[in-house]
Image (cartoon, coloured by chain):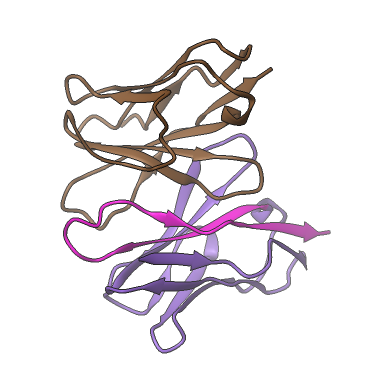
Chain colours: A purple, B brown
Amino acid sequence: AQSVTQLGSHVSVSEGALVLLRCNYSSSVPPYLFWYVQYPNQGLQLLLKYTSAATLVKGINGFEAEFKKSETSFHLTKPSAHMRDAAEYFCALRGANFGNEKLTFGTGTRLTIIP
Amino acid sequence: DTGVSQDPRHKITKRGQNVTFRCDPISEHNRLYWYRQTLGQGPEFLTYFQNEAQLEKSRLLSDRFSAERPKGSFSTLEIQRTEQGDSAMYLCASSLRGGTGELFFGEGSRLTVL
């Protein structure tokens, strides 16, 4: 069984401030982990992914995430928030084993940027 | 390189009617997925295909739902006798077998059942 927990359904930060979105996972096999972003009335766009190589992963738009096995976490960060970062963010995982083909998503975190 | 396309983008229907959504994946992708997303929730897995074979279905996919991918290219998702609880965004995604599981999503088809 596998699951994803995103702490904080809503996060607000000031423009220029640090963004930290939390994701914890549970998986019985080594995971592949993903962060997706969704803008209103649009589909999901991949921000970054962890696939058992480097534990610190850099993605698009200045975002990065660090895989911490001991903490079963994959938190998303960005040093300086921009107004265009306002969106919904989803953490997702799949097992890194053959036959485990679908992504399981968290419930999402809505990021608001305060001017 | 065109992305995943879905049609229609919006559908409003009356309870009890049938609706069908179409998804065209990225051309070289052999896997195709359907997800459902309700307000304030993350996407929930419905079903996926590898080529034309439907390999897994979620328990969310009741008997009123059917998905096909007849030639291993585009897919359709049909909902029969729609209920108000079916109102949601239906997302299609595709991927390459043997990859790292990254899914490429379409923009979704939003269903409103009155």
State whether residue B50 is above or below residue B21. Answer: below
Give the side of residue A85 with respect to residue A76, left or right.
Answer: right
Q: Which of the image's four quarters has the N terminus of chain B? A: top left
Left or right relative to A102: residue A65: right
**Residue B40 visible in the snapshot:** yes
The residue under the point 61% across, 28% down is: B87
Instruction: Give x and y (percent) for residue A21.
Output: 61, 69
Residue A43 among magenta residues: no
Q: Which quarter of the rendering shows the C terminus of chain B?
A: top right
Q: Residue B3: percent from the left, percent from the top?
A: 37, 32
In the foreground, B31 or B16:
B16
The magenta segment is: A87-115
Closer-to-camera residue (A82/A94): A94
Residue B29 appears in the figure: no
Report the residue at 62% width, 74% height from top.
Answer: A79
**Residue lying furthest bottom:** A70
Question: Is residue A88 inside the magenta stretch?
Answer: yes
Tell which residue pokes out farthest to the right in this image.
Answer: A115
| Picture coordinates of residue A75, whole percent (x, y) | 53, 74
Residue visible at 35% across and 66% down? A1
Residue at figure coordinates x 29%, y 68% from the top left? A51
Question: Which of the 4 image quadrants contains residue B72?
Answer: top left
Give above or below for B51 relative to A51: above
Relative depth, front residue between A14 and B70: B70
Number of residue marks: 0
x, y percent for residue B85: 61, 31
